[in-house]
Amino acid sequence: MRLSTSSFRWRSASAVQAALPVLLSSVLVACGGGSSPTGTTVPPPLTCSGGASVAQRAVSYQPSATPTSEAIPPQYFGINLHPGVFNGQIPWPTIPFGSVRLWDTETTWNDLNPASGTYDFSRLDTTIDVAVQQGQTDFLYTFGVVPPWASSIPTDQSCVTPQNPAGSCDPPADLCSDGTGPDKYWQNFVTALVAHNTAANFPIHSWEIWNEPDILIEWTGTDAQLERMAQDAYSIIKAADPTAKVTTPTPGNTSNGQTIANWFPGYLSTPGAAALADIVTFHGYVDPALGGSPEQISSTVDIVNSALTGLGSLSSDPLWNTEGSWGADANFPDPDLEAGYLARLYLLQWSLGVSRFYWYQYGNVATGTLWTPTGGLDLAGVAYGQVYNWMVGATLTAPCSPTGTVWICNFTKGSAPEQAVWDTSQTCSNGVCTTSSYAPNSVFAEYVDLAGNTTPVTAGTVPIGVKPILLATQ
């Protein structure tokens, strides 16, 4: 049972310690391992013989409904929040959203498990508590960043970023390349984290198995190693909370060949990998600096769907884009174009069957910026709130589709028709946006723009550009 906003509080460390041995015992039985009273067993020296297979388990699938056939829920509008939002440096967003991804909130494996047998959940506690006090109840935890003490190459400088230490992209030291080995470093961490979540009455209900494993700065291990880690995490999470949802590892795209298309099919073909997820996840950035437009997100979704071909029920499971935006602000500096880009990404992805999209990143002033310290919400931030209001509670009646350069998305909200429309042949520069004329159906009496302004339809046509408008009956 999930706690209400008013009653939520993380339990004390003593409650977590009390829950840990019980959970660990059930996990080790499920994984076929030994036993440990504390969950901090250090594995013996690793001996890798190669060629051994990893035991698999059957999974009972519950395919989701097709997103276009149901009313759009608030959770579709997910967001990645800068850690400054949780420590008071950045004000809590004034725009509405329905789900929070906990990546880049200083709550990685390395952050929470800084030494073998040592766990510090204080940052996670604060992050969850602040969000719940603001009315948030839906959280996605993302695994990633191997601690140097657990890394197979703890001095590996290729892993280093401003947030991640040496060795953090390399597999754990107690895991062979073929996926065999104790995997106790990983099992112990996941067990402790899940026990902490259990003691808090399950505020985290969705778990993302590794951030961008196709990108070498995030993961250099084999598919077999990642599949084993996914298997162990799946067993631990489900033993504690059978209703929890576990995702696939989440690939993304770079410009140097580390791509969803090159990685996902191979991982999913690893024996058993497809049986270890309830949700399929990807990262969908479309880089305007490389000539990309929001409409090209359909190509990314097609690549993901192609990788699922022949994998049975996995292809019917929910599809989430857990991270995306236009990327670096420096490559896309026009505020009006940014607002239009955001709106089109949200409109299009629901139409493509994506049932959640987590924007990256609120509070970040260099990537996907929605807020700045000097100006507050920018045009894209305002657009986020407007599109949320347009879409949440509405039902898409047919996939969004173009006629030439004009795109149309038809909705109903209650019994009233609505229509989002834009023209990709137009542009914006220095605060001025070009438009073309569009003749809407006579049923529409007014339209709303991305700034929230309402204008009556009086002359039989309306101006449309790269920033969508929403036509309504009243």
Image (cartoon, rainbow, N blue to C red):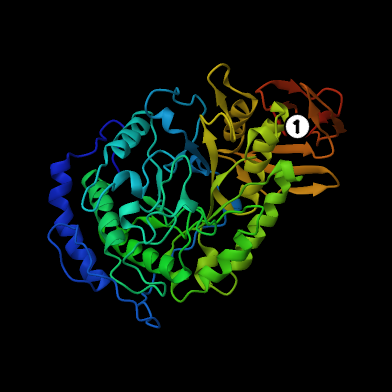
**In this rendering, position of residue 9 left or right of residue 175:** left
Q: Residues within 10 Å of mark 1 (few under 14, many from 20)?
A: some
**Spot occupied by residue 247 in the image (x, y as percentages of width and height):** 45, 58
Q: Is residue 216 above or below residue 81?
A: below
Q: Within the image, what quadrant is residue 62 found in?
A: bottom left
Task: Reply above or below: 91 against 141.
Answer: above
**Residue 145: x and y, percent?**
40, 51
Q: Residue at x 64, y 25 (%)?
A: 379
Residue at 65%, 23% (x, y): give it: 452
Q: Quadrant of the C terminus?
A: top right
Q: Quadrant of residue 368 in the image?
A: top right
In the rendered image, which residue does mark 1 sit on?
A: 444
Confirm whether residue 175 shows in the render: yes
Say which of 205 and 254 sits in front. 254
| Residue 203 seen from this side | no
The x, y position of residue 416, in whole percent, is 65, 37
Does residue 459 appear left or right of residue 358 in this picture? right
Q: At x 48% / y 26%, what residue is drawn?
A: 93
Identified by mark 1, the residue type is Phe
